[in-house]
Amino acid sequence: MSLANYRSQNQPTDSAEEAVLLRQTGSQAPAAVPLKVPKNPVLREARGRKPPGLLDIFLRHVDAVVMEQGSRPTGLPLVLVAGPRVAATFRGLSRNDQLVDDHVSLDPHLMTPDDLATAVAPVFAAAAAARVAREVGAFQRARDHELAAGDLADIGRAAVAGRVATLLIEADRFEGGRFDPATGAVEFTGTPSGPAARLETGDVVGAVAETVLARGGAIVALPRIEMPTESGVAAIYRY
């Protein structure tokens, strides 16, 4: 996105409001969405503080939109690509917990989509590795205090009770069976032999994960080699 301070040629400089244009790059016809920013004299004089600049207002709006439409639904790390000034300003006002510590100090408007992907990839990979280490470490510490489990049957009951804060699952792990959403009871039927059979058999891991999400828990998918258990699941309890 880019920021432009737009003012009509016939509009006086002391008008009641300014307009901010948000332009989404990377498409043949970039969309411009006007965002009216009121000039509030009360805000300007409030407590003697300097009112927020146009860049601050723009970046706060960007931060809110990214959280609502990207970070909250996906839980993915957020990598910032910006020049030094914009990066420092954005970090100072962002409320996004998914924003990683490192960033790419380049102007994204001068980069192609392929350039962006290449520049972001190592930062994203480092952030993902750090999260894996953090979550596995949290599981191990919780297990030392009897606040974690690696048995799917135990986790199923805890999920229904709302005890699971974070569930680590092995990526692409499938356990055939039935899950009782009322009691959390798990009944295993074995792993189906083929894709067609999977359609007729419930995925217990998936069902438990959905229950954890429905009760405000987080799901983290890990490669098999990174899992701290052999069962394909590892839960960190709230209590």
Image (cartoon, rainbow, N blue to C red):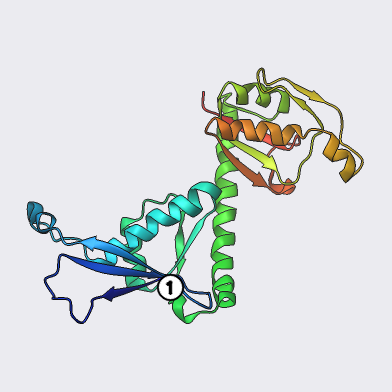
Nearer to us in this view, 110 or 15: 15
How many circles with numbers are drawn on the protein? 1
- Residue shown at the point (75%, 34%) measured from the top left: 231
Q: Quadrant of residue 213?
A: top right
Q: Amino acid at mark 1?
A: Ser
Nearer to us in this view, 6 or 193: 6
Q: Quadrant of residue 221?
A: top right
Image coords of residue 182 (percent x, y): 65, 19
Regarding mark 1 in the picture, which secondary structure is present there?
Answer: loop
Instruction: Answer left or right for 83 relative to 179.
Output: left
**Can you say whether 78 is above or below 208 in the image?**
below
Return the residue at label 1.
105
Nearer to us in this view, 178 or 191: 178
- Residue shown at the point (13%, 75%) measured from the top left: 13
Q: Is residue 239 visible?
A: yes
**Can you say whether 86 is above or below 64 in the image?**
below
**Can you say whether 111 is above or below 62 in the image?**
below
Image coords of residue 164 (percent x, y): 57, 29
Image coords of residue 40 (percent x, y): 14, 58
- Residue shown at the point (17%, 76%) measured from the top left: 11
Q: Residues within 10 Å of mark 1 (few under 14, many from 20)?
A: some
Please identify the residue farthest to the front as the structure is shown. Answer: 10
